[in-house]
Amino acid sequence: MTWHSVGKNLARILLTCAIILGIGAAIVVLSPESKATRVAVDTARANIFWMTPSTPSNTQKFTAALRDLGHEPPRAYRLNDNNVYFSTRVTHKSPEMLVHEYQQAFVNSGLNSRAWLQSTEGLLSQPSTASRMTQFDERSEAAMAGEVLPASVSRNHFVMTGMLVNNPADSQSEDDSLTASVEAIEKARVRLAASYTQCGGDPAALKRAQQRAKNQPLQEGSAAQKLDTALARQSSCDSGGPQYCSDLRERLNAGNAELKAIEAAINAQPGLKDCEALRKFDRDTLSMMSEQMTDRVYAFRSLEATRDPASGQTMVTASWSDEEFDMNSVLADEYPVSRNGADEIPLCDSCKRALSFDGTADEALYSTHSLWSTEPVSRVASEYISSLTRDGWDYIDGDSLARQVLARIETPEPDTGSVLRFRRDQQSMTINLRSDRNSGRTLITVGTTQ
């Protein structure tokens, strides 16, 4: 797993949690496939995680399991000013076998309450049933408790993720939280109704679905039913008294019934599922939930295993943070890193920094940085050659070397990228630039060694 994979898996953590956590999952309406990231912290600091005190923290339970599984001692890095750690293990066992082994180790260390063997992606692929809803509830509780769950599992690959999150009750009253949940359902109902109309949904089909949904009880075990139970327990809501709680319950039932009616009408018209407005509704809903989760995450852990079919070996890479992790700093489109190593990385006039990944202690000689620009590859390359040679760097024809490598493996030469290589004293720098058609940006990766 590279540092790029870390960002991908952080996004996967948020998406997985957004899907399995409560109300939000109930307002994603399409099929499952539409529900789919240098102040040195030295080795001694990293090794603190390798020791298990008498009352271990969640993170120490995680690292204790890794140690018992045969992982190497952790290596410390900085990711956008966050402390992150890596540890690897090589084995001949398959990823599918390793899921069982790692989950049992997490149970033994006290991190997990049980061995979670089914992946979230596998659960999403199943038809929507009461049993699946129960499994979602169980996974939700486990995720919020800091357990590590499989996100995806295949013959040659697995990803497992976990996180620690702050309780929203710490920053808002239960009354405020309940009210906000009801309001979220109402806003989703308005947006979904507009999308249904925009996609040409049949009004008669919707009316029939509304009649069927009218006065139906909330599904047992559903997020809406749990919210209704919480409201029923409250003696007052926002100091509005019992009547206000009663009104909230009525709004909850009405909003939930309307959402279910629109979803039933959509399912009765399969062609609607290809409509971009409805797909955008799902994407926006998941994005909103991910943003809400981002503010609450204060630690992460991620494992990725990849098997080489030729050798039969599987490399397992674990990554995790300390318990002061700022998820916003990693997922931001632009992050003004101000640490020592990051200051030495040049920015072209139009460049914005997204990620900085610096080694610490024994690996402080290495760093990798991700940037982007709205200018074309040729202009960005020209800016770098001009500014770096002016600062005393010697330019080496990196593109020429790249063409030689590509020729040896009989790969067509890329026409949308460029490789620049520079040297100054004992320092080396490689800059990879490529055009991203989806965003229209030039993506830049800068690697340095000393």
Image (cartoon, rainbow, N blue to C red):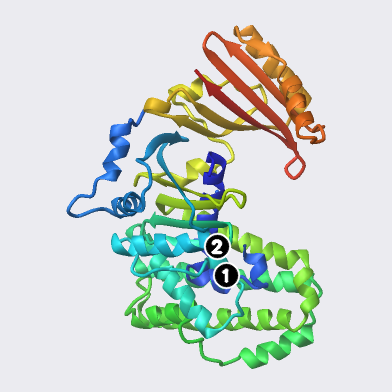
Type of amino acid under label 2: Val
First in sequence: mark 2 or mark 1? 1
Type of amino acid under label 1: Gly
Residue 81 appears in the rendering: no
Distance from the alpha carbon under mark 2 to that under mark 1: 8 Å
Q: Determine contact: label 2, label 1, CB under 8 Å.
A: yes
Front residue of 236/218: it is 218
Q: Nearer the viewer, mark 2 or mark 1?
A: 2
Q: In which quarter of the view is residue 205 placed?
A: bottom right
Residue picked out by circle 2 = 153
User: Residue 420 placed where, x, y %?
Assistant: 69, 21
| Rendered residue at 51%/86% (across/down) | 219
Residue picked out by circle 1 = 122
Label 2 secondary element: strand
Label 1 secondary element: helix
For this orientation, the residue located farthest to the front is 311
User: Residue 364 placed where, x, y %?
Assistant: 43, 25
Front residue of 395/165: it is 395
User: Residue 155 placed where, x, y %?
Assistant: 58, 61
Residue 447 appears in the rendering: yes
